[in-house]
Image (spheres, coloured by chain):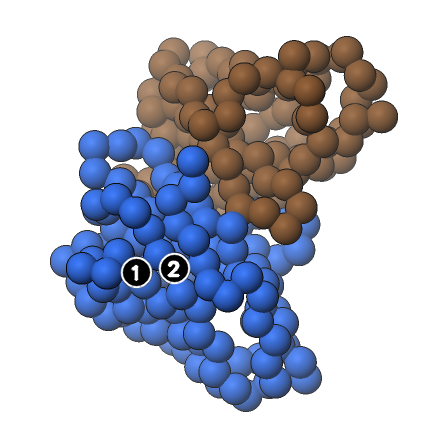
Amino acid sequence: DGGITQSPKYLFRKEGQNVTLSCEQNLNHDAMYWYRQDPGQGLRLIYYSQIVNDFQKGDIAEGYSVSREKKESFPLTVTSAQKNPTAFYLCATRTGRNEQFFGPGTRLTVL
Amino acid sequence: SQQGEEDPQALSIQEGENATMNCSYKTSINNLQWYRQNSGRGLVHLILIRSNEREKHSGRLRVTLDTSKKSSSLLITASRAADTASYFCATDEYNNNDMRFGAGTRLTVKP
């Protein structure tokens, strides 16, 4: 899992609530990514950021928001507009050689 | 949208046998990467092959790339029970800062 931490490991949310997933890295990588993984499925890109104060929507950005105020941090907020948020969320960074390093993930469950 | 598609979706073999997984993609790429994921964990980078390379080795791993067919294969030789995991290919596309993952191959190696 390298120098990427995600917290919490497990998160439970009531319907209608916003929740924020934390992703912190000490690898000094510029690019950071958020993916969603559903059971038995691959990864789908939610948002990514190439540099501080800049981020781009991925394929499934609706119902999610991000910020990139610091190089080390790329938090993801799952809003009440996301109708089916139960999933495994993975944060990653990207090296100059285009390899990605992943955090251990956060499993979000909507009650 | 997902770029890579792995085949087969699931593979079950005996310890000591070789395992071959395939990946097909749709657009021009800078490189293709293979990742491994143990259940409920983040992904771990295995190997990267550039678009101008045809074959690459790393330990018991052998990756091939055929850009004319837009396909890649991952061969794990002399498999071990500890190789049991899901394996994903990811493509790094031209003029794009994100990476696209396939749905993965679930490999089970029986002792």
Residue A48 lies in what quarter of the image?
Answer: top left
Which of pointers 2 and 1 lies earlier in the amino acid sequence? Answer: 2
Question: Does residue B30 sit above or below A24 in this rendering?
Answer: below
Task: Give the residue number, with chain letter if any, for mark 1.
Answer: B71
Question: Does residue A28 sit above or below B51 in this rendering?
Answer: above
The quadrant of the rendering that contains the C terminus of chain A is top right
Q: Position of residue A28 (x, y in %)?
A: 38, 32
The disc labelled 2 sits on which kind of residue?
A: Cys
Q: Position of residue B66 (x, y in %)?
A: 23, 63
Q: For mark 1, does the 10 Å Cα neighbourhood hold few (<14), some (14 to 19), or many (20 or more) residues?
A: some
Between the residue at mark 2 and the residue at mark 1, the CA separation in whole angstroms equals 5 Å
Task: Determine the residue positioned at 19% across, 54% down.
Answer: B51
Q: Position of residue A53 (x, y in %)?
A: 38, 12
Figure colour of chain A: brown
Q: Is residue A85 left or right of residue B75?
A: right
Question: Does residue A36 sit above or below B107 in this rendering?
Answer: above
As helix, strand or loop, the secondary structure at mark 2 comes to strand
Residue A20 lies in what quarter of the image?
Answer: top right
Task: Determine the residue positioned at 68% across, 26% down.
Answer: A85
Q: Is residue B111 left or right of residue A71?
A: right
Q: Are marks 2 and 1 in contact (CB under 8 Å)?
A: yes
Chain letter, colour blue in render:
B
Task: Give the residue number, with chain letter if any, for mark 2.
Answer: B23
Task: Determine the residue positioned at 35% across, 34% down.
Answer: B98
Q: Is residue B29 left or right of residue A35?
A: left
